Image (tube, grey):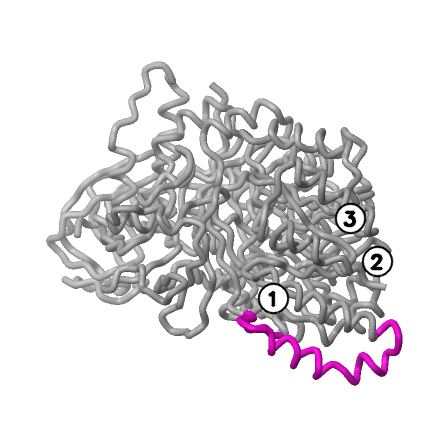
């Protein structure tokens, strides 16, 4: 079975490293120019260089989003920027605007050109249009069902990338200007105000209220959780499985990437005997517990895929510290505090390859080797005794 | 001179409106957000009427096409190749690929609603050999005139009508009513409902049809006072959109634009002088949807 790429988001360098350590084959990041998600902490060119060096060391690739739909005054310095990305060793750019694609094709030596989901590509003919333009990979629209993806995959030469997890546009992506019209923020240049998730009242022509008098109507979609479709997507020959969420925390990235890594590996190792049990979804709920939906993967979405009066459940586990180092002799781990914790708490140490170990926190030492009982300072560097080996980037979390 | 194109409300409207330069018509299931749809038989009748009156006929085939629907659209394009039409309006690049095989590229008008926002992407499509592109409604008049003057390709824009700001494949009205356990969740399908956002007063029309759910701006875009700028920068055509309008409203709006263009052609001063009059006449139309400048003088932000 051909193993697809697992592609993860990264909002900053730390998240990028976590995504790669936890099993992403490639990560996508935004630069300071030409990128959507203008409010995500985007990467400078020197950050991008560092990202590429780290990724290459771990056999992973870096993709940079240059996916705005440009206006006339966004056209300057594009060539220089693309060349700089190319020289930095970026493996691919993710584009939507035909001019950016055309310019990349002319000026760039090594980088692949990928078509963003913002172009809402829903069929093999449109895939082939872009493939003929030198686009090697198409990120499909999130409107396609698994049956349509299978059919499409057989009819195209281009690489195919499919979203498997994360936030969803409810509109055809790139074709929504709710935000432009309601807030003057341009959705196609990174200004999306998520107006689809706001509260509305719905009326008929004669001004009769049709929406619930106590609650509000909204248009928004629940997040996508594609776990149950992974075996089918792999069998269909999809080349890349994409997780959304450049704004998400490192706990989320580590957990979601780690889970899909394990799921893909488990399935590909022995597809015939693979059983999709609930350990994968349980794992993800430790870091994020928003109500799951399957988007359009099973066909036209129903009311179950909508965000009506959704209660957000807290994740079942709380991220308390990141492991920075471990001394095998003394069995002391150096950790960075991320949330309040105290001695006596039972915690789980979660690492790459789905590894999990448990301990009770005994003594906590601060930077000056003073014993403390409570870790209350964000990002404080601490030491704790851990009776089994742990590594940099392991995550310590406790049950809520 | 600029071409005045109308997407009509009915066959009756077409019969009455013998003075505009062309119509956008479509078959059920192929064209999005049309005020009316026509059978193939009626489409032939319309073509015949228009040929006699020297009006252009444009066929809207602007659905976003899902993989499973490709065959249906291939046979439709095959059907269109034998009709005496002046253009095929499309929003999905699949139609470009298909039309190429039927030598129909020079009939194609690309209208992807939101994607054409700079002069370089227009140049990109000019090189593809198509007839015309429609540029996005969310850019400024200055951007529109820059795009038009920097290109030889024919440029089309929305002249007067509602701005579609949202299209989902999902049945967002009946899904909601199913969630609320209403007895007839699909009762309001295709009715013109409207939304009001919690912190705003504007009314946004919303309806659900076989293509999913569509939401529109609360104001129509009105360009009657800027026709001079559009003509002088080389814009080829403006569309008057019949959606949310009665035959009469649409006819009166079209007449005012027709008169304004006629005035401009006769005497630019006269057109300038009459600008207030056109607005006054538009406002006097019974039940006309409120209108404004849209994004013509409003730059969107994004950082």
Q: How many marks?
A: 3
The answer to whether residue B263 is seen in the rendering is yes
Q: Which residue is mark 3?
A: B50
Residue B151 numbered tag: 2
Mark 2 vs mark 3, CA separation in Å: 29 Å
The answer to whether residue A112 is seen in the rendering is no
Q: Name which residue lies at 40% across and 42% down.
A: A165
The magenta segment is B264-292
Q: Is residue A368 left or right of residue A143?
A: left
Task: Please check the rendered image and state whether residue B265 is part of the magenta-colored stretch, yes or no.
Answer: yes
Give the quarter of the image for residue A72.
bottom right
Q: Is residue A354 left or right of residue A61?
A: left
| Residue occupying the far top of the picture | A272
Mark 3 vs mark 1, CA separation in Å: 21 Å
Query: Disc 3 on helix, strand or loop?
Result: helix
Q: Name which residue lies at 13% across and 52% down.
A: A345
Chain ID, mark 1: B
Question: Which of the image's four quarters has the N terminus of chain B?
Answer: bottom right
Q: Which residue is mark 1?
A: B249
Q: Earlier in the sequence, mark 3 or mark 1?
A: 3
Marks 2 and 3 share the same chain: yes
Q: Name which residue lies at 63% across and 70% down.
A: B295
Marks 2 and 1 share the same chain: yes
Answer few, some or many: residues within 10 Å of disc 1's Cα (few below 14, many 20 plus, some between 14 and 19). Answer: some
Marks 3 and 1 share the same chain: yes
- In the image, residue A263 sits, relative to residue A392, either above or below, namely above
Task: Please check the rendered image and state whether residue A297 is part of the magenta-colored stretch, yes or no.
Answer: no
């Amino acid at each position: 079975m051909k193993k697809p790429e697992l592609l993860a988001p990264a909002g900053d360098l730390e998240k990028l490293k976590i995504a790669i350590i936890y099993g992403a084959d490639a990560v996508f990041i935004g630069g300071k120019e030409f990128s959507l998600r203008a409010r995500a902490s985007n990467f400078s060119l020197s950050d991008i260089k560092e990202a590429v060096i780290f990724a290459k060391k771990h056999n992973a690739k870096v993709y940079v989003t240059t996916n705005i739909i440009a206006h006339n005054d966004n056209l300057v310095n594009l060539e220089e920027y693309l060349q700089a990305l190319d020289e930095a060793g970026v493996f691919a750019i993710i584009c939507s605007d035909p001019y950016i694609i055309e310019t990349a094709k002319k000026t760039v030596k090594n980088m692949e050109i990928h078509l963003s989901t913002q172009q809402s590509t829903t069929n093999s003919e449109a895939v082939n249009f872009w493939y003929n333009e030198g686009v090697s990979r198409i990120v499909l629209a999130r409107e396609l069902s698994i049956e349509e993806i299978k059919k499409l995959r057989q009819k195209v030469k281009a690489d195919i990338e499919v979203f498997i997890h994360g936030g969803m546009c409810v509109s055809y992506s790139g074709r929504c200007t709710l935000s432009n019209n309601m807030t003057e923020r341009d959705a196609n240049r990174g200004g999306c105000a998520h107006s689809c998730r706001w509260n509305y009242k719905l009326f008929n022509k004669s001004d009769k209220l049709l929406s619930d008098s106590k609650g509000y109507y909204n248009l928004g979609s629940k997040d996508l959780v594609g776990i149950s479709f992974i075996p089918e997507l792999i069998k269909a020959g999809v080349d890349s499985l994409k997780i959304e969420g450049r704004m998400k925390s490192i706990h989320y990235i580590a957990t979601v990437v780690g889970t899909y890594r394990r799921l893909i590996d488990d399935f590909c190792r022995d597809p015939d005997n693979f059983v999709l049990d609930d350990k994968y979804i349980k794992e993800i709920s430790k870091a994020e517990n928003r109500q799951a939906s399957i988007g359009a993967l099973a066909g036209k979405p129903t009311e179950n895929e909508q965000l009506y009066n959704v209660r957000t459940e807290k994740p079942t586990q709380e991220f308390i510290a990141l492991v920075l180092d471990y001394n095998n002799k003394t069995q002391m781990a150096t950790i960075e505090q991320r949330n309040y914790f105290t001695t006596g708490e039972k915690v789980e140490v979660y690492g790459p390859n789905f590894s999990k170990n448990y301990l009770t926190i005994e003594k906590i030492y601060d930077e000056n080797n003073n014993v403390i009982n409570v870790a209350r300072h964000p990002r404080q560097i601490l030491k704790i005794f851990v009776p089994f080996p742990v590594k940099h980037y392991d995550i310590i979390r406790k049950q809520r | 001179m600029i071409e005045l194109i109308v997407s009509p409300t009915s066959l009756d409207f077409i019969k009455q409106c013998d003075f505009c330069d062309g119509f956008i018509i479509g078959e059920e299931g192929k064209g999005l957000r049309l005020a009316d749809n026509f059978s193939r038989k009626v489409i032939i009748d319309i073509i015949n009427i228009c040929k006699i009156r020297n009006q252009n006929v444009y066929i809207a085939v602007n659905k976003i096409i899902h993989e499973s629907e490709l065959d249906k659209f291939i046979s439709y394009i095959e059907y269109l190749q034998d009709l005496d039409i002046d253009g095929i309006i499309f929003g999905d690049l699949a139609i470009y690929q298909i039309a190429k095989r039927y030598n129909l590229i020079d009939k194609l008008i690309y209208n992807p609603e939101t994607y054409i926002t700079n002069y370089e992407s227009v140049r990109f499509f000019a090189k593809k050999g198509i007839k015309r592109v429609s540029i996005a409604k969310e850019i400024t008049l200055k951007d529109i005139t820059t795009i038009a003057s920097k290109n030889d390709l024919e440029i089309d824009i929305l002249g007067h009508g509602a701005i579609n700001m949202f299209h989902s494949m999902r049945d967002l009205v009946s899904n909601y009513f199913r969630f609320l356990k209403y007895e007839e969740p699909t009762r309001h399908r295709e009715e013109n409902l409207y939304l009001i956002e919690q912190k705003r007063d504007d009314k946004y029309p919303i309806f659900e049809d076989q293509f999913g759910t569509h939401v529109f701006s609360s104001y129509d875009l009105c360009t009657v006072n800027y026709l001079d700028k559009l003509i002088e920068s080389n814009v080829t055509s403006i569309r008057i959109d019949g959606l949310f309008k009665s035959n009469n409203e649409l006819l009166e709006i079209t007449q005012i634009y027709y008169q304004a263009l006629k005035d401009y052609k006769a005497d630019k001063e006269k057109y300038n002088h009459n600008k207030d009059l056109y607005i006054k006449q538009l406002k006097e139309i019974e039940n006309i949807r409120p209108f404004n400048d849209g994004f013509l003088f409003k730059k969107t932000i994004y950082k």
